[in-house]
Image (cartoon, grey):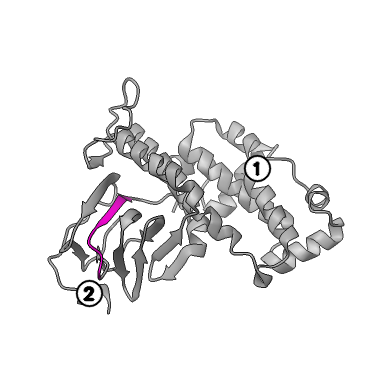
């Protein structure tokens, strides 16, 4: 059954350019139905009870520790799961940052639905990040951002660029923490060579470091030629291309969330030459770094 087939009054979605966050504790009868979908992304993080989310032909149950994300543009609906007597969850409507795409990709269920069960050790920090997002959304841009309090109002709208950016930074932490385990995958014979996975983790942990084929091979106890062969066979790309992609994603995050100069972003991302950085960044994102920071990326 698709979302269009679910009964219930259609609920409006926040305008696509807004950052709105909140926390709900809902009981039986709760349902949101959007036959036209939403212009923004919807992120939900369940802390108690169970929910059921549908979009297009895809659906998923949300239980404590689950992050479920609905991409914009498709009819969706969400409600208490059958048999549940409550659903307590955090939610956020916003435009997802481009660099979140590779984090969410392994969690795709189809029709713009992403779902992942975060590791238990991350739950407290994810909860704290949502509290911070709710508080930061109320910042006026002057003085210190407000403290995150347990009795904060259940919904906040980020007004002003500073509040929006702080709120998105908190949500970025949520997405990264929740999806990190999805990139490792469960242990087993089908996950590939562990030495390649270890090299990928080394690149992801510090893409700006002076990695080379030789240095990565040494860290995983392989000869450079054997390492390069295994890495390319398992990931589909040579190790240095994977490193460049990781450095470009890191640079994009710095451009979005800091006021570092383009030259410092290049250096922090492992590009010693600003000219080279500008060229490869434009090839990857379609615009130079300065224009990307100004929001001119596709």
Q: Which residue reaches farthest top?
A: 143
Q: Is mark 1 on a helix, strand or loop?
A: loop
Q: Residue 206 carries which label?
A: 1
Question: Residue beneath label 2, please?
Answer: 4
Q: In which quarter of the image is the C terminus?
A: bottom left
Residue 272 % position (x, y): 70, 37
Residue pictured at 35% horizontal, 32% vertical: 162
Tell me where residue 198 sits by quadrant.
bottom right
User: Against 82, is 120 above or below?
Assistant: above
Determine the residue positioned at 57% across, 59% down.
183
Can residue 14 be spotted in the picture?
no
Judge whether residue 87 is colored magenta.
yes
Classify 170 as above or below 78. above
Counting from the top left corner in percent of width and height, residue 212 is at 78, 48
Extreme-left residue of the structure: 9
Q: What stretch is highlighted in magenta?
A: 83-93
Q: How far apart are marks 2 and 1 (CA)?
A: 44 Å
- Where does the image place residue 74, in percent across and percent down from the top left? 30, 67
| Neighbours of disc 1 within 10 Å: few (<14), some (14-19), many (20+) | some
Q: Who's the residue at 30% across and 69% down the image?
A: 54
Q: Nearer the viewer, residue 141 or 277?
A: 141
Q: Does the magenta stretch include residue 158?
A: no
Q: Which mark is residue 104?
A: none
Instruction: Point out residue 117 in the picture as x, y percentages from the top left corner.
Output: 45, 59
Q: Is residue 238 left or right of residue 214?
A: left
Task: State the image quarter where residue 6 is shown.
Answer: bottom left
Q: Is residue 31 left or right of residue 211?
A: left
Q: Of marks 2 and 1, which one's residue comes earlier in the chain?
A: 2
Question: Residue 237, can we see it?
Answer: yes
Mark 2 burial class by Cα count in 10 Å: few <14, some 14-19, many 20+: some
Q: Which residue is drawn at 40% across and 40% down?
A: 129
Q: Specify the principal SS of the magenta part.
A: strand
């Amino acid at each position: 059954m698709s979302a269009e087939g679910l009964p219930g009054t259609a609920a409006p979605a926040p305008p696509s350019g807004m950052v709105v966050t909140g926390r709900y504790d809902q009981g039986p009868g709760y349902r949101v139905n959007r036959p036209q979908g939403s212009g923004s992304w919807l992120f939900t993080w369940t802390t108690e009870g169970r929910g059921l989310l549908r979009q297009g032909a895809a659906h998923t149950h949300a239980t404590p520790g689950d992050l479920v994300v609905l991409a914009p543009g498709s009819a969706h609906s969400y409600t208490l799961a059958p048999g549940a007597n409550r659903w307590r969850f955090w939610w956020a409507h916003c435009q997802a940052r481009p660099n979140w795409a590779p984090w969410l990709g392994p969690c795709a269920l189809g029709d713009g639905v992403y779902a992942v069960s975060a590791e238990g050790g991350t739950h407290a920090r994810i909860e704290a990040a949502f509290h911070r997002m709710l508080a930061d959304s109320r910042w006026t841009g002057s003085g210190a951002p407000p403290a995150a309090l347990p009795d904060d109002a259940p919904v906040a709208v980020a007004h002003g660029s500073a509040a929006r950016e702080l709120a998105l930074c908190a949500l970025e932490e949520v997405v990264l923490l929740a999806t990190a385990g999805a990139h490792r995958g469960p242990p087993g014979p089908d996950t590939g060579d562990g030495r390649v996975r270890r090299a990928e983790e080394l690149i992801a942990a510090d893409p700006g470091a002076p990695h080379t084929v030789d240095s990565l091979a040494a860290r995983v106890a392989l000869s450079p030629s054997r390492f390069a062969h295994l890495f390319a066979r398992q990931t589909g790309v040579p190790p240095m291309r994977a490193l460049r992609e990781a450095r470009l994603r890191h640079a994009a995050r710095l451009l979005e969330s800091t006021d570092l100069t383009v030259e410092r972003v290049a250096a922090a991302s492992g590009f010693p030459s600003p000219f080279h950085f500008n060229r490869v960044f434009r090839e990857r994102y379609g615009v130079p770094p300065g224009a990307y920071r100004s929001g001119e990326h596709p």
